[in-house]
Amino acid sequence: MTLQANALCILEDIRLRVPDMVTMTAAHSGSFEAFVNEASDFAEDYCDRTFLSGSLETEIFDGRGYADNIPAYHTKHVLNQAPISTTPVLHLYRWDGDSWEELNTTTYTQDTVKGTIYFPTISITEYYRQPGYVTGANAYFVQGTGNHKAEYYYGYTFGTYGGGTLPLDLRGAVAKHAIWLYNSTSQLGIVSNSSADDRTYTYDPNIPKSILRVYDRYKR
């Protein structure tokens, strides 16, 4: 067994937390690599995101615009992935021209850490409520189905011995999760479900709450 490309810790992280396993046998190493992979996959599924730097992400989403039943203009969008490593390229689908129109990057900004893009100001006039209208500083995500597209690079970088930008609490939680999996291999798994943010998670309720609390910080 080898560590997957999305592994969020390495065997050195395990050794730091299990002093009597400083010298691992080949069997131990193979087992822990399998559990690191399992814990890393769980963290990504549970948090509904990919943590390490990946290829170009293309995300299509709906614009909510402005309507009587919406309390405010749709000026902010939370991307599926974070952190953002490049300025997102934002497109609006023009139904009249049946094509994507790239928006000027000066019309919007982004929070690279939180993974959000937003238009900073709005002019509250009837004119700007016209569907499909976006311009300059008076802009918002106009109403429509699948009418916005964001292209961006994202993710943390991984350092072998604690370097990189991957948060240390997340890295440590995955290491603890792998150790817990190793220690509980003889136990029967009990599955439980929970719902949050319109998503349903399946997990073993015996996973230590201290580990799940860390994962909860990184849910999208």
Image: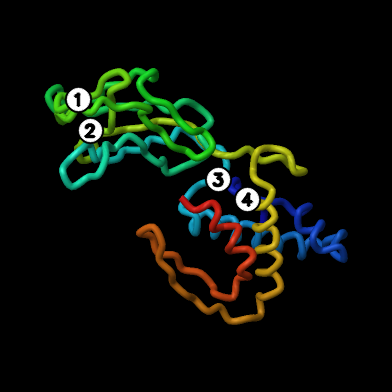
Q: Secondary structure at mark 3?
A: loop
Q: Residues within 10 Å of mark 4 (few under 14, many from 20)?
A: many
Q: Residue furthest front?
A: 124
Residue type for callout 3: Phe
Q: Residues within 10 Å of mark 3 (few under 14, many from 20)?
A: many
Q: Could you tell me how far apart the alpha carbons at marks 2 and 1 are, in whole angstroms?
A: 7 Å
Identify residue for label 1: 133
Q: Which image quadrant is residue 175 in?
A: bottom right
Task: Give the left or right position of residue 97, taking residue 208 as reference.
Answer: left
Residue 161: x, y in percent? 77, 43
The residue under the point 56% across, 38% down is 53
State the residue in front, 155 or 25: 155
Residue 211: x, y in percent? 63, 63
Residue 158: x, y in percent? 66, 41
The residue under the point 42% across, 44% down is 80
The residue under the point 36% across, 37% down is 76
Label disc, if present, on residue 7 of the rendered structure:
4
Q: Which image quadrant is residue 217 in?
A: bottom right
* Marks 2 and 4 in Cβ contact (< 8 Å): no
Identify residue for label 3: 51
Residue 37: x, y in percent? 61, 57
* Marks 4 and 1 in Cβ contact (< 8 Å): no
Residue type for callout 2: Val
Q: Could you tell me how far apart the alpha carbons at marks 2 and 4 are, in whole angstroms?
A: 39 Å
Q: Earlier in the sequence, mark 2 or mark 4?
A: 4
* Marks 2 and 1 in Cβ contact (< 8 Å): yes
The residue under the point 41% across, 40% down is 79
Identify residue for label 2: 142
Q: Could you tell me how far apart the alpha carbons at marks 3 and 1 are, in whole angstroms?
A: 35 Å
Q: From the viewer's perspective, is residue 37 above or below residue 87?
A: below
Q: Earlier in the sequence, mark 3 or mark 2?
A: 3
Quarter containing the N terminus: bottom right
